[in-house]
Image (cartoon, rainbow, N blue to C red):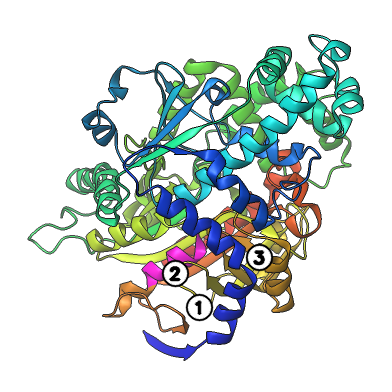
Amino acid sequence: MSVARLSITSLSDTGERLSDEVELYQRTYTTLLRSSGETRLRVLEPSHRAMRSSLHSLAASEELDLGAFLYAISRLPQAIAGAQRVVMGQSAEALIADGLDVSRWPVAESPARRRRWYVGPDGLLAVLLASSSDVDDLVPTLVAYQIEWNKIHLRLTGAAPALGGDPDAAACAELLSGTAEDWQRLREVWGPRFGEQLAQIREHHLSLRIRMLGGSHTGYARMTRRWWAPVQDTLDADERSGAAGGQRAIGGEDGGGDQPLYFVSSNTHSLVNIATGVAREREPQLIEFVESLPPEDVLHEELRRFRSGKTEGSWENFLYYVARQWFDARGEQGAIERREAEAAYGVRHLRSGTALRVSAQVIPLSALSVTSLDPRLGAVDAAALAASRARIVNIDYPLGLAAYNILREVAVDASGLRGVYVLGKAATLNADVGDVLISSVVHDEHSRSTYWLDNAFSVDDLAADLRFGTGLDNQRAVTVKSTFLQNRAYLDFYYREAFTVVEMEAGPFLNAVYELADPDRFPVGEAVNFSKLPIDLGIIHYASDTPYTQARTLGARGLSYYGMDSTYASSLAILRRILRLEGLLG
C-alpha cells in the first residue's frame, strides 16, 4: 500500500472546538462509569442538555420532545418502563461473577438495537455491550428517555383528571403538548399498552441508576474472538468437505487460508435473496399472500400497479419484500423453512451467542446455482461458478468500534481476504431518505483521521437497478461516535466542509483496513491516502435519516417497501463486483 500521511490539524481541532459540550458530556459519563458503585442518571442530565444534541433539540426546554422519546423507546426493551437500575457488562460471565445470575433471568430485546438485555428482580436490568460505542450509544439514550419521561410525568400529573384512562392522540396533544402525529406514533409503538404506560408515567418520577462492569479493550477483543470462532469453524468445515473447492483449512499448518474470501458488512436478507432463488421459487404462494391482504395495503396496491404496467419498481425486489412478510407471518415454521431453503444453496447462518449481536452468513460461491441467481447480476459462467473456491462472509452491520474489532479479527485468520465491502445506513445532509451515497473521503471522529479512498463503486454500478432513489458518488462521510453526540454547530461545520454523509461504521472499518497493509497501528489525527491496497475496497451507504433539516424524526421511520430499493441496488453492485473479480461474469 502506498500511503500519504498529512496533517489535518485544522479539521480535527475545529471539529473538537465546535463539539466541546459533546466532549464534556462524553468525558463525564466515561469517568463516572469507572466507579464501582452506581451512578444516578440525573447527574448526566445537565451536560446532556448543554450538548444541544440535534437528535434531542428540546432537551433543555419544558416542551416535550416526542421524537427523541420515540427514538429512545425503539432502542430500549419494554422492561425499561419499570426499571430502577441498569448494569452494563461485556459478558454474561462478568455479570454472574458480580452476583447477577442472568442465566436465570428472562432475556429481552429492543426493536432497533441488537443488544441482549436481561430482566432481573426489583426493577433491575442488565445489558451486554460489544464495544465502547455501545456505551456512547446507550447512555445518552437512557438520559434522553429519562428526561422526556419526567416531562410527560409532570404534564400528566396536572392533566390527569381531564385526560382519561386511554386518551386518543388528539387529546394528548391538546392537554400535554406535542403534535397529534407524534402521539399517534407513540400509540402505535405501545399498542394496547398505551393507557397502561401513561398511567405508569403519571405515577412515577423516573430516577435510573447505572453501573458498568469491565469495559476494557482486551475484554472487547476477547469477546470478538469468541464471536468469530464459529464463523472460522464453518469456513474450515466447508473446506474439509470440499464445499469451497479446496481441501485445506484456513490457518492450518499446511498453508491454508489462501482460498479467496470476500467480507461484506450489510444485512441478513438482501445478499442472500439475490444469491439464491428462495423468493422467486415461491412466486405463486407470494402472490396469493399479497392478494389476501387488505386492498389498501401498500403491497396489494403495488401488485395492481405491476399488473397494469404503471409501476416503476422491480419485480424481483417486490418478491423479496413480500417473501420476508410471508415467512414472518408463518412464525417459527416460516423461519425454519427459509433457513432450510437457503441451506440448500450452501448458505450457512450463524447466530451470535456473545454481546456482539451480529449474525453472520457463510456463502460458498460453488454451492450457488446460475439459474437461481438474480438475473440482474448478468450472465454467469456455470462451470466456473461450480469450480470456484471463493467464499463470502456476510455480517449484519455492527455498531461503531465493533466494526474495527470484527474486521481486524477476520484479517488475522484469513490470508486469502480479497475484498471488503461495507453497505450501511447513514444520515444525509444533502439528499433524501432512500438515496444511495458513495463516498471517496471519510473522516473518523474516533481516530480523528481522514481517509481518501479509491472506492470500488460509483453511481454507474447501481444506477440501472435504482428505481425510486438517487445515486450520489464522490461524497464525503464523517463517522460519528453516536447518533446523540452531535449538535447543530457540529453538523454545520461538516456541511460547510462538504461532508454530507453522517454514519457510524466506515471509519473503524478503514482503521482496520489500514492495518491490513501497513506495519503501524492505524494513525491518529492524520490524512491517509489509500492507494494500491492489497484488497478491493468499497463503501456504500443508503440514506435513512435527514438530521440536518428533520432531526426531530431521526430514526423514527423505516424505509418501508420503497426505501429497500436502494438496499438491493447496492447489494447487486457488491455481488456483481465479487463475481467479476472471480472471473465468473460473461
Q: Is 36 displayed left or right of 19 in the figure? A: left
Q: Secondary structure at mark 1?
A: strand
Dot 1 amino acid type: Tyr
Q: Is 207 displayed left or right of 353 in the figure? A: right
Which callout, 1 or 2, points at the residue further toward the start of the chain? Answer: 1
Dot 3 amino acid type: Val
- Image quarter hosting the N terminus: bottom left
Callouts 2 and 3 close, C-beta under 8 Å: no
Residue linked to disc 2: 510
Which callout, 2 or 3, points at the residue further toward the start of the chain? Answer: 3
Q: Nearer the viewer, residue 271 or 226?
A: 226
Q: Secondary structure at mark 3?
A: strand
Residue 176 drawn at (x, y percent): 84, 27
Q: Secondary structure at mark 2?
A: helix
Task: Give the residues in magenta.
Answer: 504-513
Q: Is residue 506 magenta?
A: yes
Residue 334 drawn at (x, y percent): 51, 20
Tell me which secondary structure the magenta stretch mostly adopts.
Answer: helix
Within 10 angstroms of label 3, few (less than 14), some, or many (20 or more) residues? many
Residue 314 drawn at (x, y percent): 73, 45
Q: Is 242 displayed left or right of 553 in the figure? A: left
Callouts 1 and 2 close, C-beta under 8 Å: yes
Q: Nearer the viewer, residue 5 or 144?
A: 144
Dot 2 amino acid type: Leu
Residue linked to disc 1: 451
Residue linked to disc 3: 501
Asked if 90 appears above or below 528 in the picture, the reply is above
- In the image, what residue occupies the spot 66% across and 62% down? 462
Residue 300 drawn at (x, y percent): 80, 26
| Distance from the alpha carbon under mark 2 to that under mark 3 | 16 Å
